[in-house]
Each structure stands twice: as C-alpha cells, then as structure tokens.
Image (cartoon, rainbow, N blue to C red):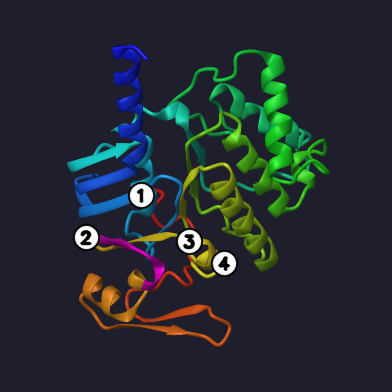
Amino acid sequence: MGTAAREKTKMRTAVDTADAVRFENAAAQVGGRTIWSDVNISVPYGQFVAVLGPNGVGKSTLIKSVLGLVALSAGSVTVLGRPAGQAGREIGYLPQRRNFDSSLRVRGIDVVSLGADGERWGVPLPFAGRYLPSRRAARERVREVIDLVGASAYAERPIGQVSGGEQQRLLIAQALVRRPRLLVLDEPLDSLDLPSQSAVAALISRICREQNVTVMLVAHDVNPILPYLDCVAYIGRGGAVCGTPDSVIQSQTLTSLYRTPIEVLKASDGRLVVVGEPEAPARHHDRHEDEQA
C-alpha cells in the first residue's frame, strides 16, 4: 500500500472511531433568547440515542443544529467527523410527522422514491443532490429499503389510505434510501397508537443494529423505546445530561439538572413515571413544543 493510501486509511479510521455527533460547550439562541447552553453530548457510532426533555426546552433546535439549519451561539457541534452542515448526504432525516389526507393518491413507493435525489415529501432538505448513480440503481434501492422496513405489502397503495404506522415505515424507508450513516428522527412515534409505537421502535432498533446506522430520535414518551436505547440525552432548561438510560432517568440526576425535586418511579410493567416539575419525558402534551425554537 502506497503512502497516500495509508494516510487515507488512517484518516478514515480516525473519523470512524470518533463520535458520530459531538456537542462541546454548545449554546443556541432563537430570537435573541438562549434556548440551552453548556451542552456536552457525545453520540458514539452505531448507537441508538433518544433526545428527551419537557416541552419548550429546544429538542428540535438541537436536531436542527445537527442538520446545520441552526447555528450555535457558542461552542461547537461535529457530525460524522465534520462541522454540522457538511455531512448532509450521509444523514437520513425524518421531520415531525404530518398526516396525509386520505384522498391523496400518491403511492407509498413514490413517496419513498423522493429520498433518492435529496428531497423529502413536503420538506426540502438543506442538502440536495442525487445520491444514486442511475435510475435503475435508484429503483433497486427503493425496493430494498421498502423490504427492509416491512412495507412491501402496501407500498403500491396510496399513502393516504394506509395506517399511521404504515405511513411511518414508508417515511423511514425514504430516509434510508441514500444509505445514511446517521438517521435523525424528530418524534417519529407521535400520534401513533401503542402497538404501532412498539412496532416502529423495534424497527428503528433493528435498522440501527443490522445496518450499523447511528440513530438520534426525539421522543415525548421514553417508554416505547426504553428497551432499545443505548444512550439518553436529556435536555433541561439551560443545559443537558447525557448517558445510559439508567444513569440519566433517575431522581438524583434529574433533580440536579432542574434544581428542583424530581422523583423517578418504575411501574410493575417496567414503565417509567417521573414525578415533579417540570413536566417529565414519560408523557408530554404539545407535540410542537419547540418547532419555533
């Protein structure tokens, strides 16, 4: 192996062994108001990480900063070894869910196909540009990801005539078309019934493990995804804590984060219940809590 090839291999190895996402002393402002500050979060490659926190703390702002859509007011964020905004083609993004009108005749497979050229259904991404080298390759990849998410049985049906859980599987397939190394999901379980939440959570976990895709998922309710998580990034007003679910979602850690008494209880079925103020991640009410943040 020549010197240039060895250096290239060394550089690739260095990037691949670093964190997929890293915030260091980060702060964000929207409209002159500080949303959060002193945030230090590390997301290792290949892990399934949940971004949690009560309403209005800036979870969506955090996701937008990963995508390069929101500039930090302090500190830094690196994504796949590069500054945020420079790794777009390697990121699969699923924004907050929108309901499709039942009269919409666009097929599920056509919605998935939009992921091949950097577009998303109704949501243009900050990074466009065709990823797949030919239409044939694009068609083959679309079929591949539809099979991967288990949506082959209804992919030819109009997107407005399949269930919420089936729509979400198709949208996840759309985000996977370009073979991302990082999958960013903003409240993918919102508005789904409990069986669909569990099924989609299990699907995302399987994709993370089998496809070696790092996953960052914003959630209101931690319980459907709790069995699958490697790490939790819990955002509070002004800061964040990051670690394993057991180390973060516990009374002492959350009390320290919010500087107010918080108690974490475990129900007989293993579900977590957080008691105290502010409102806890086990149940939130406003799905658009920080869309404006």
Question: Residue 198 location, x and y as percent?
Answer: 64, 63
**Vertical arrangement, residue 285 with respect to residue 13, above or below:** below
Q: Are marks 1 and 3 in contact (CB under 8 Å)?
A: no
Q: Is residue 231 left or right of residue 145?
A: left
Residue bearing the label numbered 4:
224
Between 98 and 108, which is closer to the camera in this rendering? 108
Question: Residue 136 location, x and y as percent?
Answer: 72, 16
Query: Which residue is drawn at the image coordinates 69% and 54% (left, top)?
Result: 165
Residue 84 appears in the rendering: no
Q: Look at label 4 and name its amino acid.
A: Pro
Label 2 or label 1, whichever lies nearer to me, is: 1
Query: Which picture quadrant has residue 200?
Result: bottom right
Between 104 and 231, which is closer to the camera in this rendering? 231
Residue bearing the label numbered 1:
43
Q: Which residues are magenta?
A: 240-246
Between 116 and 28, which is closer to the camera in this rendering? 116
The local secondary structure at tag 2 comes to loop
Question: Residue 141 location, x and y as percent?
Answer: 68, 27
Q: Where is the N terminus found, in terms of image quarters?
A: top left
Residue bearing the label numbered 2:
238
Q: Look at label 2 and name its amino acid.
A: Gly
Residue bearing the label numbered 3:
229
How far is mark 2 from mark 1, CA to CA? 20 Å
Residue 169 lies in the magenta-colored region: no
How far is mark 2 from mark 4, CA to CA? 27 Å
Task: Of the two numbered discs 2 and 4 on the same chain, state the one appearing first in sequence.
Answer: 4
Task: Of the two numbered discs 2 and 1 on the same chain, state the one appearing first in sequence.
Answer: 1
The local secondary structure at tag 1 comes to strand
